[in-house]
């Protein structure tokens, strides 16, 4: 029998659900049993806002420490929770097929965000979403929001908030029944989301055992990896961390990689956007199972093309004045 692999994960319902899905996929395609190893991170126990705690990396630190200590064989993160600077001793060995990257607005009665009454209370802990909400409906008030998906939805049901903005992927992975709550999906063209939203990062050590590397390579999706590499390159090149209201979404269709990126003022009063289509060589169209460890080395490979395209979008944004909007001290 093949040895059991140990998957390190946060303890939240969403993290456990998405980790179990990865575990089940690995078992199905490789035969390796996979055991979940729950790990508590600072982001799970602190009630402070993400910006006060220092950003999205607070969810990854404890997991990475456990991985390096040998307590597990690999980790599953929500990719948008990972800083763009990758530690040299760790690699993102797989990015499985991406879920829905959109945000959704959940309300009690289905009223669209732009029609919510003046003074309506909208909950989100994201500076990007805060800026986008203000642009979509400047009459509402935005309240900082932490907690798991269930608690956020309950605050709408209880009337404490009129709406919350959530990731569609999280709702799908948990399989929550919204009951009579209203759901408004927000199109990515007008409402680009966080770099890597909807995607998972499966991380292991650079010197991981051969069977671990082989197992993770089987669940890597090249189309997803190309898109999220371009998105994270935009974020890194802008020197923008979690404090910066930056929305970016990339999509690979055939030979075309389309990148939509917008930098917002924190109060949503202004924006600078860029929409670019990069043409990939035909032989680098999306496929599954590359397992290339996100190597962006120079040369004719799809990841290098994605890095080049993302860097070009970031340069154009900066040329158009994005540096005036991005809090550059929050480098990831």
Image: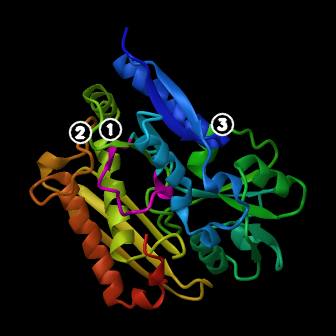
Q: Position of residue 205 (x, y in %)?
A: 33, 42
Magenta stretch, residue numbers: 79-95
Residue ID for mark 2: 290
Residue 227 sits in quarter: bottom left
Task: Give the Cα separation between the discs numbered 1 and 3.
Answer: 23 Å
CA separation, marks 2 and 3? 29 Å
- Mark 2–mark 1 contact, CB under 8 Å? yes
- Of the image marks 2 and 3, the number of the one nearer the N terminus: 3
Q: Is residue 83 magenta?
A: yes
Q: CA distance from mark 2 to mark 1?
A: 6 Å
Looking at marks 1 and 3 on the same chain, the residue that comes earlier in the sequence is marked by: 3
- State the SS at label 3: loop
Nearest to the observer: residue 50 or residue 253: 50
> What residue does disc 3 label?
175
- Give the mark toward the camera: 1 or 3: 1
Question: Is residue 250 positioned above or below 240 on the image?
Answer: above
Per the image, the residue denoted by label 1 is 220
Residue at x-position 59% and y-position 88%:
269
């Amino acid at each position: 029998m093949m040895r059991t692999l140990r998957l390190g994960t946060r303890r939240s319902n969403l993290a456990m659900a998405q980790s179990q899905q990865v575990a089940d996929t690995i078992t199905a395609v490789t035969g390796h049993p996979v055991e979940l190893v729950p790990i508590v991170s600072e982001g799970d126990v602190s009630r402070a806002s993400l910006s006060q705690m220092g950003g999205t990396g607070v969810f990854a630190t404890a997991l990475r420490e456990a991985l390096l200590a040998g307590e597990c064989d690999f980790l599953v993160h929500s990719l948008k929770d990972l800083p763009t600077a990758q530690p040299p001793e760790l690699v993102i060995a797989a990015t499985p097929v991406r879920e829905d990257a959109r945000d959704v607005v959940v309300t009690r009665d289905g009223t669209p965000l732009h029609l919510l009454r003046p003074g309506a209370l909208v909950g989100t802990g994201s500076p990007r979403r805060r800026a986008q909400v203000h642009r979509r409906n400047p009459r509402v008030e935005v309240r900082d929001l932490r907690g798991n998906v269930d608690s956020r939805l309950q605050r709408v049901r209880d009337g404490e908030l009129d709406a919350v903005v959530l990731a569609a992927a999280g709702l799908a992975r948990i399989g929550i029944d919204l009951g009579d709550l209203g759901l408004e999906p927000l199109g990515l063209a007008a409402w680009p989301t966080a770099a890597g939203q909807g995607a998972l990062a499966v991380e292991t050590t650079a010197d991981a055992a051969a069977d671990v590397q082989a197992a993770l390579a089987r669940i890597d999706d090249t189309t997803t990896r190309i898109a999220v590499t371009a998105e994270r390159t935009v974020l890194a090149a802008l020197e923008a961390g979690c404090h910066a209201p930056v929305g970016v979404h990339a999509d690979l269709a055939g030979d075309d990689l389309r990148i939509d990126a917008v930098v917002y003022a924190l109060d949503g009063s202004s924006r600078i956007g860029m929409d670019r289509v990069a043409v990939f060589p035909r032989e680098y169209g999306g496929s599954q199972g590359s397992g290339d460890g996100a190597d962006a080395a120079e040369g004719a490979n799809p990841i290098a093309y994605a890095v080049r395209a993302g860097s070009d979008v970031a340069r154009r944004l900066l040329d158009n004045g994005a540096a005036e909007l991005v809090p550059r001290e929050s480098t990831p």
